[in-house]
Image (cartoon, rainbow, N blue to C red):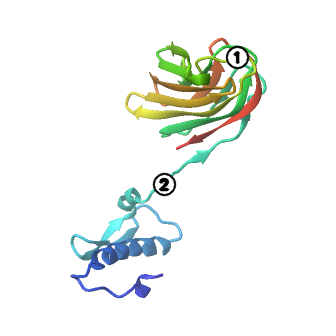
Amino acid sequence: MSVQDFPPVPPVDSPDFHPWLEALRLRVCIDDLLSLASPALGDEFAVFDVSADATRKVTFTALQSLIVTGGITLGTVTATTSGTTKDITGIASGTKRIIILFNGSSHNGTSNWLVRIGDSGGIDATGYLSVVAGIGAAGAVIGNVTSTTGFLITSQIAAGNTIRGVVMLCLEDSANFTWVQSGLIGSSEPAIHMSAGRNTLASELTQIRITSVTPNTMDAGEFNTTTE
């Protein structure tokens, strides 16, 4: 639909008038954007200003703030069938939330699963405030564990127990590179593990490591990530 094809203006005192006006403003923006194959800095667009009841010109640099960019990016499935650590690297600058999705991961020991974050200087293994608690059969609490060396995501685990669930990392303070963590992991024990924590890096986050407190060898399952 072009501006020329837009529905006729309703009466000003009609409840349909302001929705119509807002829709026209958006339509004008969209039509102007589509008329340019490759918008460039400095290009002008006609935008209907509701408050002034008139069309005004804005430059492409000003209009950029009105356009939603980015979104959720799904990573690549990574097997957890070997090794004691798995690193997620190449995290894009400006990332504000990362979700790690575990699907049937296990290792051959009894060491709790751990997630560490890092920047361009490497993986950080200090300064964490992390706690995890588990609920097992019949509602019994199985562990209430803390750590300063990483984000704990299980409170008790047996060799061969598989885990499934999500661990979320969110940027809380972009000036100080502070990240907070929350997790909800189910294990085949059976148990459910709830975790939370925070850590501050020296610079922007670029990498994440999945491991265990005393590194055990992974032997089943996989994980993936989403970033935004």
Which of the two labelled residues, at mark 1 and mark 2, occupies the earlier sequence position? 2
Residue 44 coordinates in the image, percent (x, y): 37, 69
Check disc 1 and report the residue beneath it. 158
Q: Amino acid at mark 1?
A: Ala
Q: Quadrant of residue 29?
A: bottom left
Seen in the image, is 58 located left or right of residue 98?
left
x 37%, y 31%: residue? 175
Q: Is residue 156 or residue 7 the one in the foreground?
A: 156
Looking at the rendered structure, the secondary structure element under dot 1 is: loop
Q: Amino acid at mark 2?
A: Thr
x 56%, y 19%: residue? 140
Which dot, 1 or 2, sits closer to the camera?
1
On residue 69, which mark appears? Answer: 2
Looking at the rendered structure, the secondary structure element under dot 2 is: loop
Can residue 123 be seen here?
Answer: no
Label 1 with label 2: CB-CB less than 8 Å: no
Q: Is residue 75 or residue 140 the one in the foreground?
A: 140
Residue 86 coordinates in the image, percent (x, y): 68, 26
In the displayed image of the protein, which residue is found farthest to the front? Answer: 138
Can residue 62 be seen here?
Answer: yes
Residue 70 coordinates in the image, percent (x, y): 51, 51
